[in-house]
Every structure is written in C-alpha cells, then in structure tokens.
Amino acid sequence: MRSVWKLSIAAALALGGSAMLTACGSDDAAGTAAGGSGGGAGVSGSAGAGGAGAGGVGGAGAAGGVGGGVGGAAGSGGSTPDDVWSPLSVVTVLDPTDYGAVGDGVSDDLAALKSTLAAAPAEGAIIYFPKGKTFRKTDVFAIDKAHIKLWAANRQATIFGAVLGVKRTQSLLCKATGCGFFGLQLESDAVVRFDALEDNQISVDHADDVEVVGCDVHGAAASGVFLYGSQRHFIEGNYIHETQADHIHHTQGARTSWCWDNWIYNKPPTKGDDGIACVTYGVSSAKCGDMEWWHNTILEGGWGRGYSVIGGDHIDIHDNWAIATAGAGLIVASEGSYDSASSSDITIHDNFLYGCAHTIGHPGILVSGLNGAAPPLDKLTFTNNVVVNTVSGVAYKEEGALSNVTNQGMSTNEADLPARPELADVAIKDTGVLRMRDSSFVASELRPGLYRIHVRQQGVGFEQRFEYVFRGEPSAVEGYLGTLYGVHVSETRVVGGSAYVLLLSAAPLALPASLAPVSFEELRAGDRDGSLAWLWKRVDSYDY
C-alpha cells in the first residue's frame, strides 16, 4: 500500500507561504479535499487493512485528503494515531513487584526497588509502577544506571518517602544520564526543613538529559525538584506543593533547563520557599543559566519569592503567573548574605503578578544588586509585565549595582490581567502514554528526527510508537513520505521554503541525508517567533 498525494508539496508552496498536507491511502477509501484557497478539511479515508502477523505490524492506511490552498485544513487521515502501535521491543519494562516489592504503603520496598534497578540492562529500562500500589521507602533511592525511567501512568501508583525525621533520606537521586520521572505520585512525611542534596524529593546530581513530567510532588523535606550541576532538563506539567524549601531549584552550575506548565502551591504549615529558582553561591562560581521558564503558575507561597534569578545568565522568563507569594513575584538579585553571583542577559516579559509580597516587604518585581563583591547586574530586560495589588504597594524597584536595565510596558491595571487561575484549575500533564525524549533505545542511524518514543500498556503487555519531527526541501519530503508504510502523518506544512513534518510510525525510521531533524531548541525558537507555533502546539498537546 503506497501513499499518494492529492496535492504535491511543491504545488502547495506555489499557492502561498504556508500549506498543510496529509496523505491518503491509494489502496483504501481515499479522503477527499475541499478545494479553493482556504478550503475545508479533507474527509477521512478508512484505515488500511493489514493487521499484525508473523512478520510484524501491518501497514496502517495513509492519511486523508489535502485541505486546498493556503491555510487549508489538513484531512483527518486515512490512518489514525492508534493504527501505528506495535509490540514493545526497543526497551525493557521492569515491575518492582516482580522483585519483592509489596506496594502496600506499610512495607519498606526500598530493597526491592534497588533489586529492580539492578536487573535493568546496561542500555536502560522503564521501571513501571502498577496501578493502586504505594511503594514506601525509608532511605534514598539512588539511580546510578543510565537511561532509567520511573513511570506510573497518570499517578496510578505512589512512592512514599518516609524520612521519619532523619536527614538525607528523602530523595529519588539521579546520578546518571537520562533519568526520567513520569506520572509519579510522590508523598513525604517531612514536617521540618532539611537542607542536603538527599533531602529533596527528586535530586539530580551532575547528570544530563533528565525529564520530570506529569508528577504530583506532594511534600518534601527540602525542595520538590533539585538540579545540582546537571545539564539539559525538561521539567514539564508537574504539580509541586507543600514542600519545605524551593519547588524547582537550579544550582551548582546547572544549565540548559526548560520549565513549563508547572503548578506550584504552598501555604502554612508548609511554607516552602521560591517557586522556580536559579541560584549561584560564590561570585566566581560556575553560574546556572541557559533556561526558559514559561506557562508556569504559582498559586500561593508561604515563604520566599516567585521566580528567582540569584546569579544566572541567559534566562527567559515569560507568560507565567505568580499569585500571593510571600516576597517578590519576580526577583533578579545578588545577595551579600549568601555571597551570590551577579546575573546578566535576563529577559522577563508578559508575566502576571497578583497580590505578591504578602509577608516579606518586597515590591512585585525586585532588581537588587546588593552584593558588593559581585559585578553589577547587567543586561536585564523587563517588558509588558502586569503587576497588580502588591501588598507592599510597590510594583517595581531597582537597588544596588546595576547596568543596562530596562523596564517597559509594565501595567498595574487589574483590567490587564486575564482570569486568575485557582487551585481547582491545576492540570497535570497526561502520562497515560509514556513519551520520552531519550532516543538512545534505538540504533544511532534511526535517531535523527526521532522526537519522542511512546510506550503504553495494552492488555498484559506494552506497545511502542515513534514520533518523528523533521524538515526538508518540499520535493525531498514528498519523495521520502511516498516511500513510507505503517505511518500516520499528522501534518506537513511549508514554512520559509522548508516542509516540516510531524508523523508517527510503528517502527523506527532512517531519515535520508536530504532531510534534517527538528530539535527541541528549534521548536522552542519557532514557537517564540511564531513561525513554528503550530508545530509546537501539536507536539506539546499530543495533537496527532
């Protein structure tokens, strides 16, 4: 069954700068397309017939008709995303109950968790926590093997950290490349604040390529997520609340971090501290930086500030909410009391602050270069932030040693705020399907363009699917797609002379040299400038 095109990509490009295409299966009932510039959605074709057999998964029908003209809507497809699952083969799944875990919330399952980790192959594994279980542990669970993913689909299982008032016993401690924490319900019995690396719920110690997605982090002896000298973090769609210290904390030169769609909440008796923070202790220490924090919501804080840069560089903080923080909703500072470093190249824009500084006498936004041992804060840009009902009565303040600081377009008008989010609005990222950015589980020649590997439980086993995002010259893309079977093309759109493709496949694909992968960084840049906002929205919302 070969895919054919109702309209070639080159022809679509000739119609205008942005066109959307999907394929239709020539051996299936073909989707039809509405014509004209701005045509309607193509009608879906039927799925391909071939089922799974001894040779593997049958080819899914190709996608539906083409929306005609510039901006025409793509057909819904002759195949669907569900047509392109196949039996899991690329990664091992381990269940702690197979290694002695009881999961009754009373027994100490730490030894069983360690045994499960020990059973993981060198290339990594998924540790899957089955539904309805509570795995109690009384000490640190150190993950010292690479590419280990802890997964409890949509908080279906709990890991309870019983610290029993003892320091250095809380953490899920990542010490190797490629750790992942997906859908976990994390609980703690901590009632006082501790301060060691091992006292945080999730700690990442000089490890790289870490994902924390869709977790409910409820309680911690220190921070919810603590990133210590690590690189490349994806902190997405979590609910972090009732912690004793910061909610998401970067330090010790942690760099390259994306934090988005997280919800943060704290009030007495668990005061917590900063919402999302980058802190560098020592004026000459390696700084944390190279980060983007966006679409996060702080609903209340019993102590500390909202979004804090206390010694960092190249950080973009935008489109966040900070509500009822104890101190400033946004702060960039060097602090003499902690000998913290200076900051530079910080952009803070389009944020919403409401009712901040209810306990600490801060303004809504504080720029404070008071560490005399540190250079001035430099290249700080504040644009179009809305700061309303600051308890101290001061929306914005600068103090200390500063250079190249601008604040433009700030509003203190409540009418400029959208509807304020509330506790009932908390939405944790869906992890019913495990979607991991770690492509190391497939052969190196199959990794270019592989955006995420999907895994789901199906019956008594597991299935896999592969999400590819790539681009190329339109005719090269068209030629390549015409060779594929068993794929679902979610969308192809021409932007700036290149055709961008999002597709799902039942098996890993080898991308030809004529095509280029689209990285997470490229997607983020395209979302910010608008050129790839459509594609970011699709991959971020799982709209296939």
Image (spheres, grey):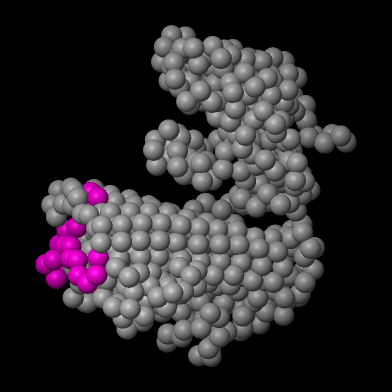
Q: Look at the image and give the residue range highlighted in magenta.
A: 383-402
The answer to whether residue 10 is above or below residue 255 is above
Residue 375 coordinates in the image, percent (x, y): 32, 70
Relative to 541, is 472 on the left or the right?
right
Q: Quadrant of residue 241?
A: bottom left
Decide if residue 170 is in sight here.
no
Residue 305 falls inside the magenta stretch: no
Relative to 27, is 155 on the left or the right?
left
The residue that appears at 61% across and 66% down in the rendered structure is: 207
Residue 434 coordinates in the image, percent (x, y): 62, 52
The answer to whether residue 456 is above or below residue 273 is above
Quarter in which the N terminus is drawn? top right
Q: Quadrant of residue 402?
A: bottom left
The residue that appears at 69% across and 72% down in the rendered structure is: 144
The residue that appears at 17% across and 58% down in the rendered structure is: 388
Outermost residue toward the right?
54
The answer to whether residue 501 is above or below residue 357 is above
The residue that appears at 53% across and 88% down in the rendered structure is: 167
Quarter in which the C terminus is drawn? top right
Q: Quadrant of residue 352?
A: bottom left
Residue 401 falls inside the magenta stretch: yes
Residue 262 coordinates in the image, percent (x, y): 42, 58
Which residue occupies the foreground of this view, 537 or 162? Answer: 537
Which residue occupies the foreground of this view, 455 or 277? Answer: 277
Decide if residue 110 is in sight here.
yes
Residue 508 coordinates in the image, percent (x, y): 73, 39
